[in-house]
Image: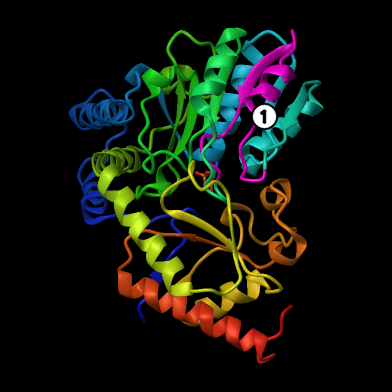
Amino acid sequence: MDKIIYLDNAATSPMNNETLYGVIAYMSENYGNASTSYSLGRRAKKTLERSRNTIADSLKCNPEGVYFTSGGTESDNMLIKGLAKTHKGKHIITSCIEHPAVLNTCKELEKDGYSVTYLPVNGVGRIDTEQLEKAITEDTCLITIMTANNEIGTVEPIEEIVRIGHKHNIVVHSDMVQAIGHIPLNINDLELDSFSCSGHKFGSPKGVGIAYIKPGIDCDPLIFGGGQENGLRSGTENVPNIAGMAIALSYATRNIKGYKSKMESLRQRFLNNLGSRPYMINGSKGYRLPGLLSISFPNVDGENLKLYLDTKGICVSNGSACHSGSIEPSHVLKAIGTPDKYINGTIRISFGNNSLQDIDYVADCIKEYLRKVNKNEISRE
Ligand code: PLP
């Protein structure tokens, strides 16, 4: 296969060798069911518990609160529904720029009689914590606000959100799918009650994630069955992928400083190379994920640009890959007020294991595309 320059790590990320070999070993040799009591099963159970501890060490949270799931979507569904049901009240507060895993779960709860406040965000995608506090009513049972946005990379004031929630005795959940493995996090210090995590966003296999619930907080299960994971998430545990997720998370959190400086240098190199072309960057300058860049070009079709880059071996996204296929303008870009002439010309570049030469090539290809559009060699639509 020709070389691929992969710049869509916010959609999913490749495994490094340490993780890959770990997963293979658990698939080929350590294939027992963790619920069986003979030695192969006990070995799988040990792997499961070791992985739980590694994850808790990496995120500074309590291993007893770590429940393994199939990924971010399931964790958001389980935690939002499960926490809403077990806490008094029928009002939920979230933000209007959440991932569909949160927004559509809230919409489902609305059908069950819950009311939901969708907080607006400012021009860079941050909620206003004063508005959050004003939105709280006697009936509020849950606050669910993401830590980092998947389309524009903006990081929300999560410490303040937790502080306000707890001041009013309200349980606080956060979708941390894009944040985990990308920015330093200390869940115990944050005093967050619950978060969701997806392995494939930081170099683990797909189809595995975490639902975290601070011990002592009640939550109903979403999936019923054989009572695995303390009865909160039934189903035979995916031990190889869980072990892979623990290896990947431990690697990512140990290397988080180096990762940040590498991401910053790739991003800066890209922007320097793009030169003086008209563009706008979406999201916050100061509160953002280091590896994610949402950039909009005026009067350009982002889908076409993405496909053009694909012909050059470059993978980027023009929205959130989790709901691509839909040609609706992004709800996040609309919420931050991206002007009409820019909104369709948006691509999301999420850096990873790229070289500076790769980045130079990508910037050159984009400049070439923009030149062709200007000369009408490529249609604007
Ligand atoms: N939440 C956010 C912020 C995401 O970016 C995604 C996926 O992109 C999800 C939830 C869903 O995660 P998963 O793909 O593991 O279901």
Residue 60 horizontal/vertical position (percent) = 32, 24
Q: Around disc 1, counting alpha carbons within 10 Å, would you say few (fewer than 14), some (14 to 19), or many (20 or more)?
A: many
Nearer the observer, 286 or 176 = 286
Residue 173 horizontal/vertical position (percent) = 55, 24
Nearer the observer, 203 or 293 = 293
Nearer the observer, 87 or 309 = 309
Magenta residues? Answer: 123-149
Residue pictured at 64% horizontal, 71% vertical:
303
Task: Label 1: state its secondary structure.
Answer: strand
From the viewer's perspective, is 296 left or right of 135? left
Q: Is residue 145 magenta?
A: yes
From the viewer's perspective, is 119 left or right of 148? right
Residue pictured at 57% horizontal, 74% vertical:
277
Question: Which residue lies under the disc numbered 1?
Answer: 94
Quadrant where the C terminus sits is bottom right
Quarter where residue 33 is shown: top left
Residue pictured at 75% horizontal, 27% vertical:
117
Look at the image and tell me whether residue 42 can be seen.
yes
Q: Amino acid under label 1?
A: Thr
From the viewer's perspective, is 68 left or right of 303? left
Residue 191 horizontal/vertical position (percent) = 44, 17
Residue pictured at 73% horizontal, 20% vertical:
135
Q: Is residue 311 magenta?
A: no
Quadrant where the N terminus sits is bottom left
Residue 299 horizontal/vertical position (percent) = 71, 73
Nearer the observer, 122 or 302 = 122
Task: Please say if 107 is above or below 66.
Answer: below
- The colour scheme is rainbow
Task: Please say if 23 is above or below 274.
Answer: above
Quarter where residue 133 is shown: top right
